Image (cartoon, rainbow, N blue to C red):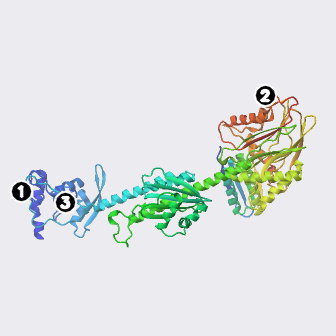
Amino acid sequence: MEGRHGAPTREASAARTTEASPAAPGATPTAPEGGPGLLDGLEEGVVVCDRAGVVRAANPAARALLPQLRVGEIVDVARCEVLSRAVHDRDAPASFETVVVHPDGEHHLRGRRGPVLGPVPPPPPEPRDGDTAWYLRDVTGEHARTDTLLAAQERAAFLAEAGRALHGVLHLDRTARRVVALAVPRLAAGATLVVRHDDTVTWACAELGGGRPRLGHAGTGGLARVPRLAAALTGEGAGTGDPFLAGDLTTLTGLEAPAGDVRTLAVPTTGVVDALVVLAGPRSTGSDSRSDSGSDSVDPLVLAEEEVLTSYVARAGAALAAAALHEEQAHLGAVLQESLAAPRLPATAGIAWGAAYRPARETMRVGGDFYEVVDGSERSAFLLGDVCGKGIEAAVLSGRVRQSWHALRLLEDRPGRLLPLLNTALLDAVATRDESPRFATMVLGDARPLADGTVALRLATGGHPPPLVLRANGDVEAVPVSGMLVGGLREARFGEAEVLLAPGDTCLLYSDGVVEARGPGDFFGEERLADALPRCAGAPAAVLCEHLEQTVVSWLDGHDHDDIAMLAVQAPRHAAEAPQRSEA
Amino acid sequence: MPELTIRTERTDGPGGQAVVVVGGDLDYDSHGRLDDAVGAALDDRPADLVVDLAEVTYCDSCGLRVLLGAHRRATEVGAAFALRGARGQPARALKLTGLDQVFS
């Protein structure tokens, strides 16, 4: 011990000398002439201090870390406080961490007390020509950290890619193809997806090097031939790796059976569809080097890969469910649209009809506006209205209104009496279902062509803009009739009016989408509508509606709009229906 | 299109009043928010519920539906319901549908 502390003084001076001048011969870790000492090659900074705290040696790494440090001088607070304390206080912890300020910023420094140099300085090897020196370091930890990080990044990237690829596809077949394409080769050498939606089974299959995934459909009846698959689809099947499942897949797809191990994964789809993915030759979930090394320990990599699989099927399930729902909705929309499409106008002797219908730009093209015209032997009945809302909800309500009207008008043909009936019918329908208030606004009426070429109208309104009458000479009058919402209030009152159309006169029913069309500045408004009408005087009803629609669309100037509906009832001019388009 | 704004002012105590001050466009896209605000205002069991429409720039049938619903819900919990301040298009819509007579 004594010697350990006694001897180094020499070395300290030697080290100090090294700093300034070529090393004295025999000085311990210092360089032999012409070459660096052994300590000099270390990446770790090494500082040797004597009992008094005088620095006896410091290799370049240490000097880089603590630029103030000088061999032969005492380590004091100014040079490195924590090191100084550690050196002087023998009870100080054997390791420390501190922050050192360098010109390029703060560096975190970790120090530990190491074994001191031996009592006799190790003899430096005699330098020989051709010597090489090797510095060895254990980097297992670093590599493991890097590998783990890279693997985690790869998994995150894969899942992000899966999310992107599956997001917003909203088409079952395309989604199915993408689901299997994503799985190969990342998850397996082959992947088959089976989806049951309503009465159709869709399968998609991707194989390593197999090009675009193949896809096919079968009826659910076909599931009888593949009982294992059918059971697995409902989650009742045998566990993963059921060899007979592969056979069932072949039966379903007509493709070769997947080779190698097979793993079946249920796809969570919130009940919209049933789906499963069969992975063939699934990627080994452990890294090869450590496979079979003790089945009792849970390898974090295996766990992470399982999480990737879970996330992958979750994303697939969400995308498939969304696509299936979207297709259901699109189908529903198409069916509704068919049943609710604006009706054909009849050819009625003595009456000319015209109409325009422009649903709001939103999805499904099923709007809240509607009109109906029914040709009758004496009187022809018509209806134009608007229900609140859009889409399916509006479609259902407008369907209810139309059907009620079709039925009730057979019992009561006077518009002013028909409206209260309709009001009660709609209120009752809502009341029996605990729905929130749902109402419609409408104009309804009938038209009776008379022998003298005039047409007698009876009109009633409920909460709707009053119809406008365009006389043949260009005069415009609002029909003085008003009434309350239909289906909103038990005690609602409705007004009725009669109008006689002379030949060339037109009565225009319109929805509020016309006057509430909002262009860049303002609403289109009743006044602009009334101003636009005279220019249509003399035009056939159909032309008039088309012209007004165009006027409103120009006003919108590309802005969104609510549904726009118009219905024109016209007493034709006596002479041939010569369109007598007045200029604008 | 002006965004819908809703502010509820309350006077506390028995016989308290809740005033829901609405501004902007009350339409298909925004009506649900007013419905929620009315529900929240009625949760405090005010004696009066007033909906102030002075700053409403547009009210479509969905907006009317919420007002009608508010009237109904207020009546159910024994609160007096009143509308005030409607002008421009909302005032025309209320008149056209006869709701101005219901709410006056």
- Whether residue B78 is visible, yes or no, is no
Please provide percent x and percent y for residue A154.
40, 55
Report helix, strand or loop for mark 1: loop
**Disc 1 residue type?**
Pro
How packed mark 3 is, by other alpha carbons closer than 10 Å (few <14, some 14-19, many 20 or more), is many
Q: CA distance from mark 2 to mark 1?
A: 118 Å
Which label lies toward us, 2 or 1?
2
Q: Left or right? Give the position of B87 relative to A75.
A: right
Image height check: is A466 above or below B43? above
Using the rendered image, report if marks 2 and 3 lie on a common chain: yes
Q: Quadrant of the C terminus of chain A?
A: top right
Q: CA distance from mark 2 to mark 3?
A: 104 Å
Q: Residue drawn 68% across and 42% down?
A: A561
- Determine which residue is flagged by label 3: A47
Image height check: is A574 above or below B70? above
For marks 1 and 3, the one nearer the N-term is: 1
Which label lies toward us, 2 or 3?
2
- Determine which residue is flagged by label 1: A25
Q: Quadrant of residue A100?
A: bottom left
Dots 2 and 3: beta carbons under 8 Å? no
- Determine which residue is flagged by label 2: A581
